[in-house]
Image (cartoon, coloured by chain):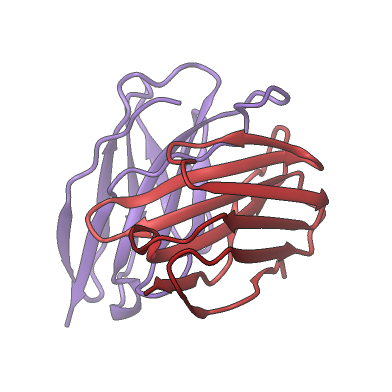
Chain colours: A purple, B red
Amino acid sequence: DAKTTQPPSMDCAEGRAANLPCNHSTISGNEYVYWYRQIHSQGPQYIIHGLKNNETNEMASLIITEDRKSSTLILPHATLRDTAVYYCIVRSANAGGTSYGKLTFGQGTILTVHP
Amino acid sequence: DVKVTQSSRYLVKRTGEKVFLECVQDMDHENMFWYRQDPGLGLRLIYFSYDVKMKEKGDIPEGYSVSREKKERFSLILESASTNQTSMYLCASSFMGRGRTEAFFGQGTRLTVV
């Protein structure tokens, strides 16, 4: 799986958009970008994923650049409860094979939302 | 809702004991994973399984083994617990195949080896 690079920490004011960047310059054509977050003392929680097109769900939006070498997770109106570690992961989309499904976590970005 | 349930939230064991951490998922997922999480080191994959009785080593398998006799259950075994295995252990599961294959995590087991 391709390696990802994220800033170690970011701050955001409550009610503002939080934009979390991720670089994945070695991503290959069959790899998805996944985002998870981990709130203190809980297991990681899935947020969103995408392949080429931008994606939006009830939690966030994912913007993937045209060359797919980087992406941005957007929390449109951050709240104090969004304070967490956010992980960007690249994962193979190929079915079958023993390496499929393996999730490799980096260090993530600690997002702190302040009042 | 998908549920991944880990048998214990907190566990204290003695050095040299054999320790079993159990994980059960209720979504018929093919893939199951065991991670450990330590401050400054993030989540590291210990083992994963993509089918019953099938397993693959992750990044840090030394000192651990796993068992998957039934699809819904994945056990992590510490053959002889040591103090450096004190950690938070997280189990996860996911579907295999194209499309929506996000992993669902349990709440974690905080293991202390004394």
Would you identify the image quadrant in which residue B22 lies?
A: bottom right
| Relative vertical location of residue B29 with respect to residue B1 in this rendering, above or below | above
| Residue nearest the viewer, comparing A55 with A82 | A82
Residue A63 placement (x, y as % from top left): 38, 40
Query: In this orientation, does residue A56 appear?
Result: no
Query: In this orientation, does residue B80 appear?
Result: yes
> In the orientation shown, which residue stands out farthest toward the front?
B16
| Relative vertical location of residue B108 with respect to residue A70 in this rendering, above or below | below
Residue B104 placement (x, y as % from top left): 60, 58
* Quarter the C terminus of chain B occupies: bottom left
Would you identify the image quadrant in which residue A69 lies?
A: top left
Residue B43 placement (x, y as % from top left): 39, 51
| Residue nearest the viewer, comparing A75 with B42 | B42
* Quarter the N terminus of chain B occupies: bottom right
Residue at x-position 35% and y-position 78% = A81
Residue at x-position 31% and y-position 59% = B38
Residue B90 placement (x, y as % from top left): 51, 61
Would you identify the image quadrant in which residue B6 lies?
A: bottom right
In-image side of B111 versus A11 (left or right): right
In-image side of A70 versus B97 (left or right): left
In-image side of A22 versus B35 (left or right): left
